Image: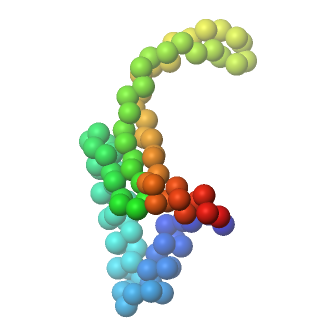
């Protein structure tokens, strides 16, 4: 099953003595903070989980798969994720 924001909110609501509105607000604020940091080009590191980084990809040659025509793809920023050693170890055990 996929973990969604709604499931995170439900888990917080069931675990802590917060209202559902407060749980939604907390989750939304955390994700907004993460998005803002990545938008600014900063890394986001969560100890024991992993690190998100913004990387610049250079322009490159590509190909239209329908026509076979060669095209130039623009440079762009992408988000990459590298899991922590702890998470990697947990995943290897299962």
- State the colouring used for the structure image: rainbow
Residue closer to the observer: 79 or 64: 79
Q: Residue at x 54, y 12 (%)?
A: 61
Q: Outermost residue, top direction?
A: 70
Q: Residue at x 49, y 15 (%)?
A: 60
Asked which quadrant contains residue 22, the reply is bottom left
- Where is residue 74? Give x, y as percent: 45, 19
- Where is residue 63? Give x, y as percent: 63, 14
Q: Is residue 68 above or below residue 50?
A: above
In the image, taking residue 53 as reference, residue 94 lies left or right, namely: right
Q: Residue at x 42, y 20 (%)?
A: 58
In the image, taking residue 63 as reference, residue 17 lies left or right, namely: left
Q: Outermost residue, right direction?
A: 66
The N terminus lies in quadrant: bottom right
The C terminus lies in quadrant: bottom right
- Where is residue 35? Give x, y as percent: 35, 51
Q: Is residue 13 above or below residue 31?
A: below
């Amino acid at each position: 099953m996929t973990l969604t924001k709604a499931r995170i909110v439900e888990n917080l609501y069931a675990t802590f003595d917060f209202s559902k509105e407060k749980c939604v607000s907390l989750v939304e604020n955390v994700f907004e903070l993460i998005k803002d940091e990545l938008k600014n080009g900063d890394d986001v590191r969560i100890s024991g989980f992993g690190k998100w980084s913004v990387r610049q990809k250079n322009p490159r040659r590509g190909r239209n798969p329908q026509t076979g025509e060669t095209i130039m793809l623009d440079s762009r920023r992408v988000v990459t994720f590298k899991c922590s050693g702890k998470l990697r170890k947990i995943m290897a055990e299962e």
